[in-house]
Amino acid sequence: MALVRIAILCLSILTCLAGCGKSESSWTAQGDVLLRENDLIGAEDAYNRAIAVEPHYAPALYGKGWVLYASGFENLRPIARQLFQRAIEYQPEYFGGYRGKGVLLLEDGKVMAAEKFLRTAFEKDSEAPAVLASLGQLYLQAGRLDEAEQLFDRAMSFSTARGELHRYLAELAMARGDLDGAMKHIETGRNLSVSGKRGLMVLDEGEERVLLERARLLLEDPDSTDPIRFEEALQALEGAGRLLEGSGGPGMSKAPTEQRRRYHRELTRRVRERLEP
């Protein structure tokens, strides 16, 4: 028994020595890897360790803020915003804090303020795929489709994991009314490298959006009297349902997924009503 306790003590000491000697940049890099694998709990722990080593290290503050934002918990958004602001204050030349604040503002519907921060992030690093994609999403929401497309294409030119970026090209195709083109972009993305489980999740959510929109359009088409369209709508909803079953993950709020499931259930109910004899 004494030997076992000594072995455990030695292992604990070695583990501590291996971890305690890591720099803030090493912990942050570990957090980035875990974040890409959608391990939000592990990623937050790594960023916390980086901040413990250097409280003013902006990439770790930004990384932790992004984890809290990505979790989907509304009560964590103010903390994420504070972390992004601290990243800006401590390292004004680093893009992360500006991007984080811009994304939050965009989701809050404050487009002009969001553009200011995202444009600043772009000025700090015009080759960061994350910045290019976020600014492209802003232009997409604003209906500036050509500008959005240019940014998405540019993001893919600088990214080795380009698969999930095709989700944004799919969104662009949807905005142009091309659902077939949108689905082709999702399929293309799945055939390319992606940045871990989060990249796959991005593509899954993109495909889900395409399928739900296809079902909605088939259901609400005023010019079609062909009942087969309701069968096609149901097939699209079944595909979306399968994707919804695998959405979310540890450390993530269930509220955003549940909201999408409610929309899915409502469309399914309406389609089944039309299929009843």
Image: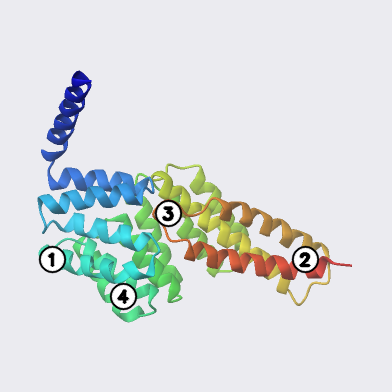
Q: Which residue is mark 4?
A: 114
Which quadrant of the figure contains the C terminus?
bottom right
Give the percent coordinates (x, y) of residue 244: 57, 56
Q: Pointer 3: what residue?
A: 165
Label 2 CA crowd tier, 10 Å (few <14, some 14–19, many 20+):
few
Q: Residue at x 15, y 54 (%)?
A: 51
Q: CA distance from mark 3 to mark 2?
A: 34 Å
Which residue is at the front of the view, 61 or 139?
61
Identify which residue is drawn at 33% across, 75% down.
105
Mark closer to the chain start, 1 or 2: 1
User: Could you tell which of marks 2 and 4 lies nearer the N-terminus?
Assistant: 4
Q: Quadrant of residue 93?
A: bottom left
Q: Secondary structure at mark 2?
A: helix
Pick whichever, 49 or 138, lies toward us. 49
In the image: residue 91, left or right of residue 253? left
Left or right: 267 in relation to 11: right
- Label located before the other in sequence (1 or 3): 1
- Horizontal and vertical percent position of residue 205: 51, 57
